[in-house]
Image: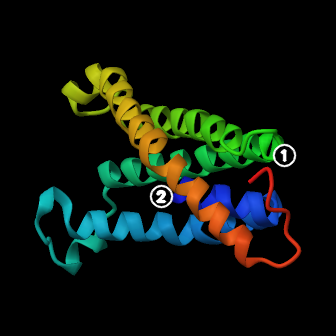
Amino acid sequence: FIFLATDLTVRLLGKGPARLVIARVMIPALIASYVVSVLFQEAAFRGFSALLEFNTFVARISLASFLAYVLGQILDIQVFDRLRRSRHWWTAPVASTILGNLLDTFTFFFVAFWRSDNPFMAQHWVEIATVDYGVKLSISLLLFVPLYGMLLNGILKMLPGRPQSNA
């Protein structure tokens, strides 16, 4: 969903505002991810005292999520911005989705599980990341890109003075 919101922001306002949104949510998202993950590690509330000890496993997962988000979004914005004026409305969201999700997915799994203490994940992170990427890509291309086209068309119709062609 975040790629959809970012793509609409880049299309309508440019890459500067989209980058600003990412910059404003990066650190709070990292902190929230760590805190919630420590409090509810292994699907059970561990109590607020769990926050008194630094959890390296959770920190690694949170950092992986943070880096994946930032790098994926930056690539998504760059690709989308370069292609947003192309002849077909779908070129920019499709290309940015393919590349942004690829970087996001493999960054997360690499940082989180390469040489991790979990032997299964350390050995199979590439296969799991590949399947995860395939699922993300399928959902994005089948659901989010058409939704993007409908939302963009609706927004452009509501904005006075905006070009309605080349959505």
Pointer 2 or 1: first along the chain: 2
Dot 1 alpha-carbon crowd within 10 angstroms: few under 14, some 14 to 19, many 20 or more: some
Circle 2: residue type: Phe
x then y, percent, for residue 104: 52, 40
Q: Residue at x 79, y 50 (%)?
A: 166
> 74 or 64: which is nearer to us?
74
Which residue is denoted by mark 2 in the rendering?
Answer: 1
* Extreme residue in the left direction: 44
- For the C terminus, which image quadrant? bottom right
x then y, percent, for residue 138: 40, 35
Which residue is denoted by mark 1 in the rendering?
Answer: 85
Which quarter of the figure has residue 53? Answer: bottom left
Q: Secondary structure at mark 2?
A: loop
Dot 2 alpha-carbon crowd within 10 angstroms: few under 14, some 14 to 19, many 20 or more: few
Residue 116 got which mark?
none
Q: Residue at x 80, y 55 (%)?
A: 165
Q: Is residue 48 left or right of residue 159?
A: left
Q: Residue at x 41, y 54 (%)?
A: 62
Which quarter of the figure has residue 10? Answer: bottom right
Badge nearest the viewer, 2 or 1? 1
Which quarter of the figure has residue 41? Answer: bottom left
Q: Classify 12 as above or below 78.
A: below
x then y, percent, for residue 99: 60, 33
> 69 or 31: which is nearer to us?
69
Q: Is residue 65 left or right of residue 121?
A: right
